[in-house]
Image (tube, rainbow, N blue to C red):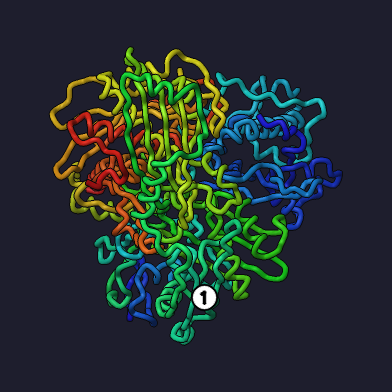
Amino acid sequence: MKFEVNNKEVEFVGDREMPLLWYLRDTARLTGTKFGCGIGSCGACTVHLDGKAVRSCSVPVGALEGRKITTIEALAAADGPLHPVQQAWIDLNVPQCGYCQAGQVMAVVEFLKAFPEPTDADIDANLSNLCRCGTYTRMRQAIHHAAKLAKQSAGGAA
Amino acid sequence: MSNEITRRNFLTTSLYGGALLFTTPAILAKTPSRPELGAISDDAEKNLSLLAKIHPDNTITFYYPSPEMGQGVDTSLALLFIEEMGGDMDLVSVEPMPYRIKRDAEGKVTPLSVPQFAGGSTSISRNYGLLRTAGANARQLLLQAAATKLQQPIASLNAEKSWVHSEDGKKIRFADLIETAAQESLPDEFEPVLKNRKDWQTIGVKRFSTQVEKIVTGQPLYGMDMDYPGAKVALMARSPYLDGQVKKLDASAAKKLPGVHAVVELPRPPLDENYTYLAGGVAVIADDFWTAKKARDSLKIEWDKGPHSNESSASLYQQCADLLKTKGQIVRDDGDFDGAIKSANKVITRDYRLPLVSHAQLEPQNCIAHVTEEKCVIIGPTQSPGGASVQAAKVTGFDRTEIEIHYTRLGGGFGRRLTSDHVAEAVTISKVSGYPVKLIWTREDDLAHDFYRPMGHHQVIAAVDDKGKVSAWSHRLAGTPKHYRRGRKPEELFDADLYVDDFPAGLVANLRTEYHLAKSGMPQGSWRAPAHTANAFVIQSFMDELAEEIGQDPLQLRLDMLGEARELEYGQHGGPVYDTGRMAGVLKQAAEMADWGRELPAGRALGLAGHFTFGGYCAQVAEVELLEDGKFKVHKVFAAIDVGIVVNPEGVIAQVEGGINDGLSAAAGQQILVEGGRVITENFDTYPMLRIGDSVTEIDVHIMPSSADPSGVGEMGLPPLAPAVANAIRSAGGRRIRQHPMNAS
């Protein structure tokens, strides 16, 4: 079977039950996507599947035929600027241990598509990735900041 | 400042690959052939510690000596060195310092130069003098080189932002001094002079983490991301029963799976010795995680349930309650407690219960190990590479100094990786199987096999005299001991769970502290701010209960008990003194920030708590709203913290913010449940940890100005949160919460 990872087509032969997470980490050697719980609870393994945020520990490779996966490594083009959410995370110095943050960023990127000007209540109701370090308060500021950055860059492009 | 380290054995220079190396100790300091040292042999590099490199492009690599786990020491320790060196932090990147130990003349293992360890919030206090001295020496070497190159007297030179400037306006980059500086050594008459605080340009200035961009772009930084030539993935099926072991194993299905290389049995560790790894069981070794996982799932194992098969959460609480009906070990006894109780106007007694909790650091345990006849290589997340070498030496028979350890960035520590069971396990599996292995724990493994924060039943008794003053105080604890299999005598164990000089010791004349040791098969260990998390909740909740009973304002009662500003003896970690004035200072500051006493809408209230943790003073006021079904929302926390001189204010604020959310997460929902001699809490679906929706919406942190020695900050922000929230809930008209998880009805 074939699918696309970070804009490159890949061919897969093997156990179709293997979670996408372990394909990414062990086969594709893309270790930015993290293993946290294996049951789709913590969100450390969040990637985009056809543009939607999914928890890759709970998506079997067998479900990927013809689909497109984007991981944190390809969220921003290699030679381009960082994604506004990554930039906002830097501007607010969000990470502490940092292990959950790639997953947080991937989740927030998709969230901001649905909620381009989110309220705190939108954030509370729609984001659920786990951060043991407790960076949530900083993260909340960064989400609002990222929304502004995204708006500016969209304005600049238009 | 450390007395052991003198200027000349601490820091010398050499040239390596075009870069200027600042290395410790003085192995290359007086070598006549040093100018020819274009390449140091790999062997020579094993006998020195790299502290910093100046590269030909004028960038600097700083090798941080304490493992980084989110507490920000990779950045804050760099600030200390760079300030004194006169470097530019904008040019600095960081790497972990290679781990180096040696045996001294008496054969004792000591650090080669700098202690490499992260725990107890000690990285800043331990390195504050050391790294500044190193920086001052580095500056001197650079100035000497510049004096030669610029033909100027050294007294006319100054290092700033990685340039050396002369009084008459000449300047030269550090990078252009590399070759000259490599030939310099510190003159005998040189004494490093540290900068005056008023001249600081780097220490005390807000600095973001040096690693943020790598983190948000998914660069490999963590043990879980590391690779090793030929390494296979190992997963282990551990005995789910406390101190249980394999009775019968059928691994035939696992062995048939393509990609499985070996199935090896690990015996149950001896029960009467200090720990190595935590549980016996069966390891499977395969090409990748998924194959190993399938192989592990296919194992048919019958377990011997071991000696604790009747243990449960209920039995532990019952044991503690029964113990409190008896007289325990009196570990502090001031004045005449019994007499003061007899003559009291009023005696108030309250009980509090705290469960076992797991570290649940987000990066599950993992470790790469390769053991051969010749070597033992370890790569992985550890707060204590020294502890890792102790365990690996026990398993392999190598001398500790021969073991090669590379510590990575940690996806959370919180005390979990102070213990080195994961290292011992990986080393054992590699030794038994002969493969280089990358051991990976699943989340289920991680929650079921932890060194848990101890559980306990606390009872606090206070007597109030006829003038309304607190005349007697007793804190009684029956609980499981933090010091698990560390070879200590039972009567010594109390000191890890009761810090006898904690508030209000020394402030109430008749005071007694009593400990009861509960028996349990559960491994216990250090969990962020160890006993302070439980004891702050108990004591600071009780303070509000006392205030309510005697009709006093909770802030005023605390200030009255603290009395005038003075230093009391404090014999535990964080001492030697407890300063009542600094404690009162943070309480008043947090109260002022929160506008303590203001009117709030019905169902909302403020709650206050303050605690002294490992040398730092932190007070918090939580603004809490009661919701339906006994739930609550923490809208805002006002925090004041006094940790002495602050090296990186940004880091202090981040640690307090994190500590507040972490403290809420632990207190609100977390408990590890035990049933039938095994942990039954499996994963995050039954171990509720805080998500953004329940987090504190807004946090305001004030750092108290201070000229006291720095104390570190990784743990101080956590303990006051739970009692502040519990006190707010009560003030808002809710119930008095006397247990964790606070969300339980």
Q: Position of residue B289 (x, y in %)?
A: 45, 71
Residue at image coords 37%, 16% = B560
- Where residue B64 sits, quadrant-wise, is top right
Please name the residue shown 72% across and 54% down the image.
B46
Direction from residue B681 to residue B79 in the image, left or right: right
Q: Is residue B654 above or below residue A110?
A: above
| Residue B689 image position (x, y, % from top left) | 32, 50
Disc 1, SS: strand
User: Residue B682, relative to residue B103: is it above or below?
Assistant: below
Q: Quadrant of residue B407?
A: bottom right
- Going 21% across and 52% down the picture, which residue do you hit? A126
Q: Which residue is mark 1?
A: B285
Q: What's the chain of the residue with tag 1?
A: B
Nearer to us in this view, B517 or B373: B517
**Depth check: B372 or B422 in front?**
B422
B541 or A38: nearer the viewer = B541
Q: Is residue B703 rendered to the left or right of residue B68?
A: left
Residue at the (36%, 23%) spot, across then down: B463
Q: Residue A20: where, in percent of width, then height?
A: 35, 70
Q: Amino acid at mark 1?
A: Ile
- Let me know if residue B231 appears in the view: yes
